[in-house]
Image (spheres, rainbow, N blue to C red):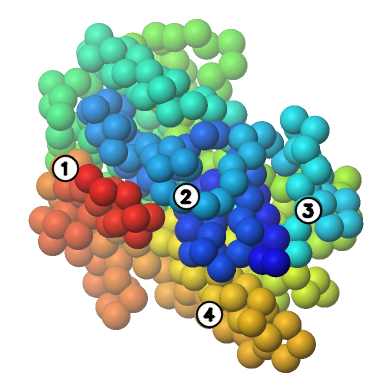
Amino acid sequence: MKKKVVVVGGGVGGSAVAKKLEQVADVTLIDPKEYFEVPYAQMRCIVEPSFAKRSIIKHSEYLKTARVVQSAARGISGSEVITASGDHVEFDYLVITTGTTYSGPSTRAELIKLYEDENTKLLAANSVLVIGGGPVGVELVAEILVDFPDKKVTLVHSGDRLLQFLGPKASQKTLNWLRSKNVEVSLNDRVEIQGMPGPQYVTKNGAHILAEYLKICVGKHVGSSWLRDSDLRQLIDSDGRLKVDRHLRLEGKSNIFAVGDIVNTKEIKQGFLANKQAGVVADNIKRLIQAPTQPKLAEYEPLSTPFGIVSLGRYEGVAQLPIVPQLPILGRLPGMLKSKDLFVTKTRAELGVSG
């Protein structure tokens, strides 16, 4: 009889683990959504909703033998995951990949409709306010600039530089690029949305902004609240992340792993790292299934040097590469690496989905 593997969370890490293990184990994926979404494509879908038809993939499209339980996880008791829908799903091995909190649509059709509605609002607006100067906020601003160059765009960021997960030179190059496109960038500032229905907004520093379209692009909370009353509550650190060892197993747990934003590895939380972690965890579970008493487990090496590519619309991007992190590149080359397709074709191929 095949071992039971339960994967909680259907994002980058969870979908990859489930796909890699479904042929060697009895896999159950627990996720409140019926789909996996390529996260790098989200901002493109706002300016081009039809792009979502390839970037949103139903779990049933790429999982051929695994079972999908469409529900949120509510807790863990012994060797069972308890879901919001009342299921008690048994496991021999558990992989927790609940990343950050999620409150969006549960079906693919609903999410596509959401992007279509966002696009309608954007098209009708002459002025745009984006709050948050991390990769999501910068990418959205750039998408709007390239597709709708006549719109007045303002970006407000609470930090002293954009893209703070990269080095200062990458931040400055990006700031210069945005300002060359007539974006009003306000650093070390905030907008308190509560009590401001728009289209008039006032920043903490007293700036008045007219914006007919508003998008908030700030960080989400770690998705570990469902574990706080579970058997694993002692393994949640002060940041809400799970404490893992070098094999990505929860500390002191021989059969429970974690992947993605929820783990306390000392590195920036990025999608490509979640995918890398998923490979390590899937490999280790295979080794445990094959040799449960004396497995030689693979180790995960956290990223030591910040690395990233941020798309700037359809053709350009800014990249900080690990080989020469002090020399970021902005222009067509990073755009060729990411911006045209936003890794959608690559991701679909990895999941075995055609088209």
The residue type indicated by label 2 comes to Leu
Badge 1: few (under 14), some or many (20 or more) residues near its Cα, within 10 Å? some
Circle 3 sits on which residue?
90
Badge 2: few (under 14), some or many (20 or more) residues near its Cα, within 10 Å? many
**Distance from Cα at disc 3 to Cα at disc 4:** 30 Å
Quadrant the N terminus occupies: bottom right
**First-in-chain label (3 vs 4):** 3
**First-in-chain label (1 vs 2):** 2
Disc assigned to residue 301 = 4
Which picture quadrant has residue 145?
top left
Circle 2 sits on which residue?
63
**Distance from Cα at disc 3 to Cα at disc 2:** 19 Å
Circle 1 sits on which residue?
314
> Answer yes or no: do the residues labelled 2 and 4 have beta carbons within 8 Å?
no
Residue at image position (37%, 67%) is: 307
Disc assigned to residue 96 = none
Residue 114's x, y, as percent? 40, 20
Quadrant the C terminus occupies: top left
Answer above or below: position of 328 versus 312.
Answer: below
Front position in the image: 316 or 254: 254
> Answer yes or no: do the residues labelled 1 and 4 have beta carbons within 8 Å?
no
**First-in-chain label (1 vs 3):** 3
Q: Nearer the viewer, mark 1 or mark 2?
A: 2
Badge 3: few (under 14), some or many (20 or more) residues near its Cα, within 10 Å? some
The residue type indicated by label 4 comes to Glu
**Distance from Cα at disc 1 to Cα at disc 2:** 31 Å
Provide the secondary structure element on which disc 3 rests.
strand
Q: Is residue 234 visible?
A: yes
The residue type indicated by label 1 comes to Arg
**Distance from Cα at disc 1 to Cα at disc 3:** 45 Å
